[in-house]
Image (spheres, rainbow, N blue to C red):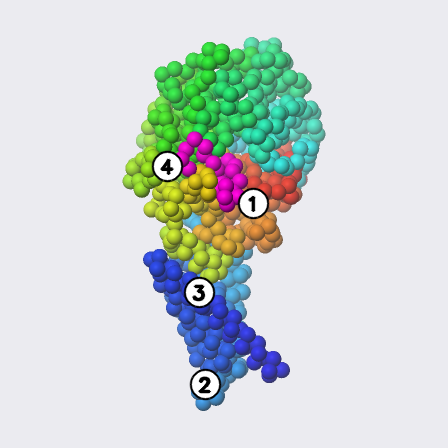
Amino acid sequence: MKNSRNILVVIIGIVLVLLGLSLAGGGVYLITLGGSWFYLPAGLAMAATGLGLARKNGWALYLAWALLIVSLIWAFSEVGTDFWQLVPRTVTFLVVALLATLCAPVLRKKDQTRVIGCKVAGGFSVVLAIAIVAIFANMFRIHPEVEASGDKAAVLDEKAADDSGNDWAAYGRNTGGQRFAQFNQINTSNVKDLKVAWTYHTGDLAINGSEYQVTPLKVGNTMYLCTPLNKVIALDPVTGKEKWRFDPKIEETEGNKQWKRCRGVAYTELSDAPQGANKRIISTTVDGRIFSLDAETGKLDESFGDNGFVNLLNGLGPTAHGSYYLTSAPLVADGVIMVGGKLNDNLTTGEASGVVRGFDARSGKILWAWDASRGAKDSSPLPEGQTYAIETPNFWGTAAYDAKLGIAYFPTGNQTPDFWTGNRHPYSDEYNDSVVAVELKTGKEVWHFRTANHDQFDYDVSSQPILYDMPGKDGTTTPVLIQLTKRGQIFVLDRRTGKPVIPVEYRKVSTDAMPGMKVADTQPYSAISVGTAALKESDMWGASIFDQLYCRVQFKEMRWEGEFTPLSDKKRTLIYPGYYGGFNWGGGAIDPSTGTLIVNDIRMAQWGKFIKREEAEQKGMKASTEGEYSKQLGTPWGVERSMFMSPLGVPCFKPPFGSMTAIDLATGKTRWQMPMGSIKDAPINGVAPGLDIPLGMPTMGGPLVTKGGLTFFHGSLDYFVRALDNNTGKELWRGRLPVGGQGAPMTYIAEDGKQYVVVVAGGATRTGTNDNRGDDVIAYALP
């Protein structure tokens, strides 16, 4: 027994020596990069502790405890009380101290007496074990980024949206994209009782690159939704029973083969059609068409366009087929259908035009065409046979509309390829990453506002603008537009003029760019943003002290002079906020009764590097628009890029990686900010941990806010739909989903008088496999 114990102590000692030397070796390299000096002495102390244990020297115990105390002082001095930052900095040294203390009975002083007695060693071991267990237990608790003060949001408009009816008639409930419902049947006091009312399966699994990102509509006694294959389905909103379905039979192309989405359909009532035959569902396809259906029967309206369809490839030239497709819900208002389209990123120059067009909702006839090459000068459609200017910034989200002003608002992306700016047209630079306001009837530009200058990082503005009438302190009201961006910046503009209502500052940024690149020396920064603090070395994270050190080394090896540090062919450049967001297409919600903006975000740093295409071929790299290598044909360089991850498969930067945030627009202050989602169902190196640890995961889709004091959300990487308290951000209810979700929840009052909340679950975003995919439409209601 004694020999076995001695052998175990020696093994522990050898392991600590090896781990300590690796930590010290990495620490030496980090110092040469100008990084922290902590890891070298800490590694040497760990190795010395291991050596002492192997030799059964009593001083090993004292050294282990000294290392623990020093590491705690260092950790708190670097990151304060940030729980998730403290974990990798402290747990390893707690374990080392615990092992040394457990080994204490066999350790001897120079005079061969015990260094401490068994009872004392046992007592200290219990204390250390309790500390480790306490840390582990706290991993299952939410650690707010900003804790609510406890004060309820002041009610600014008690009657907000009271006249908006019982339906959900547009993608964002209304054309202002507010995602707010005045219903309070389900509220903070009874949401805990929410149950599944019905479930429907569409029959189209989200596989082979398809994703369910749809927000259904409900109008009258019918719910409408689309599948990733652009099939439109009508359901009974009380029972979930199918009424009809229509299949537009999409063509699969190289462009949409791995990119099939349908985020929503539009509903309209035609003013020039007979009563009872005037209701239409307008939808689009991933092969570039618009079609119109009778909302009551699902029959194709053959008087629309060419036998029910409008071909959006007309006027886009030969490169559009297979490259141009639609994924987002169209805006349909005042008899006009307004659409843009998605283009393949990063593959080549010469991509088709990003033209935005308006069509007559009754006939399908084109009314106007706005493109960046003509801008405010001309929005008339080109004659048949002519082609809109190639390579103009496109609009691939959903537009918003102010009926009083007659103005529609849409966000733009940039000219492809995204990571090389040397080939950009002046008009592309003028309109990249912008919000553009046009007259809905004519397409004539009213104003535009640019959210980034010379976008180098695929910072397309994609979320639907949110329109809100913001009350001022002097009793006046300003009609504002709230635009969320991938940069995490939230721009609040007067929607009449495009002038900032919340201050915007233009700050100097790095201009150390490759020859031939065009870069801007300043970028716009709003006074309101989420998750935009520049990363620094101490923000590097990992599951342990070892991969944290690895991440610090990687960070110091990269180019990083803050956001907009240009890419290089010499070294990798850190990209943060990453090109997934910030805020992606999912958008946010506004509670107009309190003036609170509620948004979910993504915080995932990436890195990028220019690479010669010949070198990429030699490495066997496969080109794609979204993968780790893109050719960028027509430019001098391909681009290599990836997520910034540790060898253990966890992000190299501190959590949360996604959050839900409530912002008081009157003051610009964050009322609360909560990590959103757990690691439970998120694969790490292909394996889901199954642990409900609420780190805060990258989010997709958007929130739903109600006057019942609730925010509903189901777009995290775990399989839950949640209801949060609007005043505190605390979770009041959750429902387990069969698979993950990506869209935004919606709600309505049905004919039976009940309030329903509906989510669509087709699988979490971009899993890369056909596992854990679904086709579930799930409605919740009170018993």
What secondary structure is found at the residue carrying circle 3? helix
Q: Earlier in the sequence, mark 4 or mark 1?
A: 4
Asked if disc 1 and disc 3 are in contact, CB closer than 8 Å, the reply is no
Res 408 → quadrant = top left
The residue where tag 4 is placed is 666
Q: From the viewer's perspective, is the residue at label 2 or at label 1 nearer? A: 2
Res 8 → quadrant = bottom right
Q: Earlier in the sequence, mark 2 or mark 1?
A: 2
Q: Residues within 10 Å of mark 1 (few under 14, many from 20)?
A: many
Q: Earlier in the sequence, mark 4 or mark 3?
A: 3
**Is there any visible trace of residue 202 in the rendered image?**
yes
Pick the quarter of the image with the C terminus.
Answer: top right
Q: Residues within 10 Å of mark 2 (few under 14, many from 20)?
A: few
The answer to if 133 sits in the magenta stretch is no
- Residue 554: % across, % down: 42, 53
Q: Which mark is residue 109?
A: 2
Q: From the viewer's perspective, is the residue at label 2 or at label 4 nearer? A: 2
Q: Residues within 10 Å of mark 3 (few under 14, many from 20)?
A: many
The residue where tag 3 is placed is 23
> Magenta span covers which residues?
616-637
Q: Which mark is residue 717?
A: 1
The answer for how far apart the CA atoms under marks 2 and 4 are is 67 Å
